[in-house]
């Protein structure tokens, strides 16, 4: 696996692969890799001839008081894991390499970033779209894989790519879960034993909502209330939001008439966890 730290070197490598006619598949990450990330890398092999990952904890997507400084990092382990799934190159830039002195240009996708996580993390998606656009200019991928765990991020990047005519195919990958249902996340490391038990309420509540919907419940308010009370019944949980939205516009829906996104963010101890599923009403 090639390790690349400099923007220019990554661009030259990408250009040379492109000249050889190779299709570059890209998986951007913030590191502290888990089986969810590795599943995206496996999927990347099916979409391209070469797989490039990036590991970069992007400061511009963290707000004041969020966990940028304390975000878990273990580069040595990450590189071992990535090598194990046959990644061809890992791009590991420093903050100074990505944001040189004088940096002042941002990419902003407006409407789809206003709801859900955007309500309490106002600059978050601006940081995400900016760094993803930069990474696309550096890695020059033909295709990029993003997890549906960050559903709003996936919708936002699809929108950005469409709006700015970016020649990258965006592929979504289903959420990868632990055996007990907990969505895999680098932030799960923040949970102690008891908090981890409480965290199971997120995926359990998604299943509750699925079965309500299958049973014919169409009122989003009823589903949200059931989900909230299931989550709030566990210790150390604090709901940031539980919402039912249109899966493309991400605007709230009151009545479920087609596929609808049920999305949530919940603090469990110091971890802010997100999870979601698409509710399918019976036809
Ligand atoms: P992160 O390192 O958290 O920025 O995530 C990097 C990529 O992995 C993003 O596209 C995430 O959506 C994706 N990802 C993280 N956790 C999971 C998971 N449990 N299942 C599927 N994709 C995931």
Image (spheres, rainbow, N blue to C red):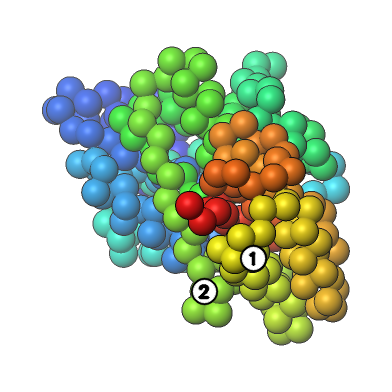
**Residue at 69%, 78% in the rendered image:** 196
Horizontal and vertical percent position of residue 259: 54, 46
Horizontal and vertical percent position of residue 263: 67, 52
One can see residue 149 in this view: no
User: Residue 102 vs residue 78: left or right?
Assistant: right
Q: CA distance from mark 2 to mark 1?
A: 23 Å
Horizontal and vertical percent position of residue 97: 55, 30
Front residue of 208/201: it is 208
Name, please, the residue furthest toward the bottom. Answer: 193
Which is closer to the viewer, label 2 or label 1? 1
User: Residue 200 vs residue 123: left or right?
Assistant: left
Compared with 100, 94 (above or below) is below
**Residue at 65%, 30% in the rendered image:** 112
Q: Which numbered circle lies on residue 178?
A: 2
- The secondary structure type at the circle numbered 1 is helix
Query: Considering only order in the chain, which callout, 1 or 2, is on the residue closer to the N terminus?
Result: 2
Q: Which residue is mark 1?
A: 212
């Amino acid at each position: 696996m090639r390790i690349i730290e400099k923007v220019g070197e990554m661009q030259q490598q990408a250009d040379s692969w492109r000249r050889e006619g190779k299709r570059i598949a890209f998986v951007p990450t913030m590191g502290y890799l888990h089986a969810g990330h590795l599943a995206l890398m496996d999927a990347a092999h099916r979409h391209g001839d070469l797989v490039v990952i990036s590991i970069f904890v992007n400061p511009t997507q963290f707000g004041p008081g969020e966990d940028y400084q304390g975000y878990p990092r273990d580069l040595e382990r990450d590189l071992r894991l990535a090598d194990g799934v046959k990644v061809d190159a890992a791009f590991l830039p420093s903050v100074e390499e990505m944001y040189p002195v004088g940096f002042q240009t941002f990419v902003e996708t407006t409407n789809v970033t206003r709801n859900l996580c955007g309500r309490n993390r106002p600059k978050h998606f601006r940081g995400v779209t900016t760094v993803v656009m930069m990474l696309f200019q550096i890695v020059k991928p033909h295709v990029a894989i993003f997890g549906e765990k960050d559903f709003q991020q996936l919708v936002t990047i699809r929108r950005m790519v469409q709006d700015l005519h970016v020649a990258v195919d965006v592929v979504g990958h289903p959420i990868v879960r632990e055996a007990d249902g907990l969505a895999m996340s680098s932030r799960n490391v923040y949970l102690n034993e008891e908090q981890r038990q409480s965290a199971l309420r997120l995926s359990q509540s998604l299943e509750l909502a699925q079965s309500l919907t299958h049973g014919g419940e169409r009122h989003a308010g009823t589903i949200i209330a059931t989900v909230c009370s299931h989550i709030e019944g566990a210790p150390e949980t604090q709901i940031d939001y539980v919402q039912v939205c249109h899966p493309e516009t991400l605007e709230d829906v009151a009545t479920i008439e087609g596929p609808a996104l049920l999305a949530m963010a919940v603090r469990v101890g110091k971890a802010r966890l997100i999870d979601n599923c698409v509710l399918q009403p019976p036809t």
